Image (cartoon, helix red, strand yellow):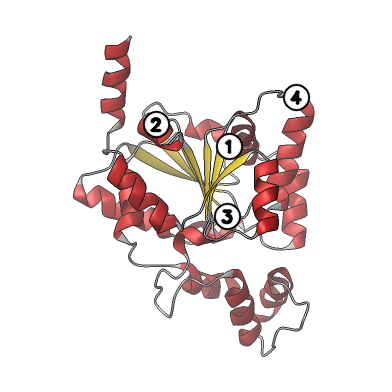
């Protein structure tokens, strides 16, 4: 109810996680989950996961053991085609698009949308190391890879404990901006459980500097959240939408007509 008017006005921001692109087909199989990537990396190193082996453990080992690690990782996270509902999100105006995924699904979806001539605006892609000032172009919408992009592997990724620590010790422009949006509201989190130490650190820093007695409303979209997570998200100020990413967007598409950024500007000026 409340989220649809926000989307229709172009004021909503998205934070997309693995649930947005999980199982999109790659050249070899499908985009892996965290546990699947851990097992793939360990298999390439001739190892098997132990009871306490995490993705970060596997990632650090694979960096040392797999020749041309960046190329191997690229083969795991590069898709050639996005799904129709993923493509259609670019027919809508968003305040910002953030993703913690390192795959290329969003860029492929955008290129597909451009070929149909149905994009709502110019979407410009940024990596977490880029200064946010580059995203200030009027009429364009930033799409930001918060943990790195497989298309810019040389910039590095935020995967391991060390990389998380390095990210939390820096003031990264896009992380800082995302944390601000979490405070002021209007953020829709999809396919992401918000268990990201680097984002949490920037959010804590913002909260300590800017005490907000009336935080804005945010939403989190996930299917079948367990009871404890449900309570924790509500306590953190999130409204929960029990749905998959595809289910959520299909309802949005059926409820809200796509508009370009020019259409929204005309509507705004007519009201004024």
| Residue 212 point in image, percent of width and height | 71, 24
Q: Secondary structure at mark 4?
A: loop
Is the residue marked by circle 1 packed among few (<14), some (14-19), or many (20+) residues within 10 Å?
A: few
Vertical placement of residue 83 versus 207, above or below: below
Is residue 57 depicted above or below 9 in this figure?
below
Q: Which residue is mark 2?
A: 5
Give the number of the disc on residue 154.
Answer: none
* Residue shown at 50% from the left, 73% from the top: 76
Q: Which mark is residue 131?
A: 1
On screen, residue 5 versus residue 38, left or right, reads left
Q: Label 3 belongs to which residue? A: 192
Location of residue 78 with respect to 221 vertically, above or below = below
Callout 2: SS: helix
First of labels 4, 1 by sequence position: 1
Report the number of discs.
4
Q: Are marks 4 and 2 in contact (CB under 8 Å)?
A: no
Q: Secondary structure at mark 3?
A: loop
- Earlier in the chain: of badge 4 and badge 2, it is 2
Pointer 2 with pointer 3, Cβ within 8 A = no
Q: Is residue 235 visible?
A: yes
User: Nearer the N terminus, badge 2 or badge 3?
Assistant: 2
């Amino acid at each position: 109810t409340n989220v649809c008017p926000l989307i229709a006005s172009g004021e909503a921001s998205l934070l997309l996680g693995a649930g947005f692109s999980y199982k999109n087909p790659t050249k070899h199989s499908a985009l892996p989950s965290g546990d699947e990537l851990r097992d793939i990396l360990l298999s390439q190193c001739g190892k098997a996961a132990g009871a306490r082996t995490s993705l970060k453990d596997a990632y650090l080992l694979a960096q040392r053991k797999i020749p041309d690690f960046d190329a191997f990782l690229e083969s795991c996270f590069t898709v050639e085609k996005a799904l129709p509902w993923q493509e259609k999100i670019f027919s809508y105006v968003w305040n910002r698009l953030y993703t913690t995924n390192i795959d290329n699904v969003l860029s492929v979806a955008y290129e597909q949308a451009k070929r149909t001539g149905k994009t709502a605006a110019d979407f410009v892609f940024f990596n977490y190391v880029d200064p946010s000032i580059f995203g200030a172009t009027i009429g364009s919408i930033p799409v930001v890879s918060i943990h790195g992009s497989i298309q810019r592997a040389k910039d590095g990724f935020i995967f391991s404990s060390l990389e998380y620590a390095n990210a939390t010790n820096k003031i990264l422009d896009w992380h800082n901006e995302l944390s601000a949006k979490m405070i002021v509201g209007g953020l829709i989190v999809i396919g992401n459980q918000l268990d990201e130490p680097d984002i949490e650190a920037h959010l804590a820093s913002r909260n300590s500097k800017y005490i907000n007695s009336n935080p804005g409303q945010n939403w989190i979209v996930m299917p079948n959240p367990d009871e404890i997570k449900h309570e924790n998200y509500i306590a953190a100020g999130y409204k929960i939408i029990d749905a998959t990413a595809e289910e959520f967007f299909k309802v949005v598409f059926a409820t809200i007509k796509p508009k370009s950024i020019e259409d929204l500007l005309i509507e705004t000026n007519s009201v004024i």
